[in-house]
Image: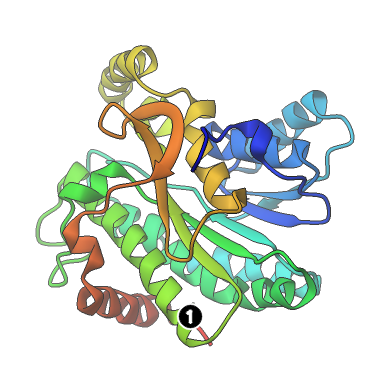
Amino acid sequence: MSKQWSLDDIPPQNGRRVIITGANSGIGYHTAAILARQGAEVVLACRNKRRGTDAIARLQRELPGARLQLEQLDLSSLASVRAFTERQLALGRPLDILINNAGIMAPPRRVETTDGFELQFGTNVLGHFALTALLLPALEAAADNSPERPRVVTIASIAHKTGRLNFEDLQAVRHYGPMSSYRQSKLANLMFSFELNRYLRVAQSRVMSVAAHPGVANTNLFRGGRSAAARAARSVLSSLIGALFNSDLTGALPTLYAATAPDVVDGGYYGPLGLFETRGERVGPAKVASLAWNEADARRLWQACEVLTGTAFG
């Protein structure tokens, strides 16, 4: 970039349709607000209907006339993913941008999804894999009807740098560590984005696959918790992060850049450039751990996702 990119550089999004998972709070919420302000029609795909309704009401107060839609989507349930995508495809409308934003971070104990997967891998990885595969026809329809290339933006994390894919125990049945399972899921997100890009290029598709990370942002990932002790610990961590690192809005900048900037490249990965990639309003190419470039492991991960979700691309 020849100059620092900012929100003012986001081109008009009139006529574009966007789906954002986990858009009721944090980075997803601010991404939805800014894209709606720029004229996009935004679908907030949220697990919790009440929180989603509250988010829509808040956005409508802030942005009268914004085109917003709430859809219930629980990424930890493949049945919910399939029902959501069936409703979307039944509309017969193109999809210009899919932002795979929702995520679960480090539950203290191993929890399973309704399909029997470890919660973080099942939600962060498998849910988004199936969602993207099933929505690909709508993205391809946008590619056929617009000069702007459709984009899939998958949210990774700087935590991917210390992640490892344990193909012998992807569901952490034998050993569960809250952060090790989170780091694995974020490495998998990034590798999925890269492998999706390779798939799309071989298919000669106009759809782009890119990834972004927010640095360290003060989002609900840090504020949540299932117990009083966990909530108290995360409250302290949240306060430290709020003082030292990114706000929700600043954390949304890499996502918005990946979704809209004209100089984004196929297979790109973007994040904040300040303080070891943890903070800052300057956005640019992010550093990738060597493991994330392993194409053999990425193909193996892709195949595992196909088997586990019963979903295939193409």
Residue 111 location (% of width, % of height): 29, 51
Q: Position of residue 107 (x, y in %)?
A: 28, 41
Whether residue 24 is visible to the viewer of this picture, yes or no, is no
Tell me where residue 272 appears, x and y as whole percent: 39, 35
Name the residue at the right extreme. 65
Left or right, 141 with reference to 192: right
Q: Which residue is mark 1?
A: 201
Identity of the residue furthest to the front in this view = 2
Q: Residue at x 62, y 50 (%)?
A: 260
**Image quadrant of residue 140?**
bottom right
Name the secondary structure under disc 1. Answer: helix
In the rendered view, tell whether residue 239 sits above or below residue 49.
above
Name the side, left or right, on which 76 lies relative to 150: left
The image shows residue 251 at horizontal and vertical percentages of 47, 32
Q: Is residue 21 above or below residue 228?
A: below
Question: Viewer-proximal residue, 254 or 30?
Answer: 254
- Left or right of residue 253: residue 58: right
For the residue pair 268 and 181, the one nearer the viewer reads as 268
Q: Residues within 10 Å of mark 1 (few under 14, many from 20)?
A: some
Amino acid bearing label 1: Arg
- Front-lying residue, 4 or 91: 4
- Tell me: residue 70, above or below residue 249: below
Is 14 on the left or on the right of 138, as rendered? Answer: right
The residue depicted at 60 percent of the width and 59 percent of the height is: 98
Residue at 72% x, 45% y is: 11
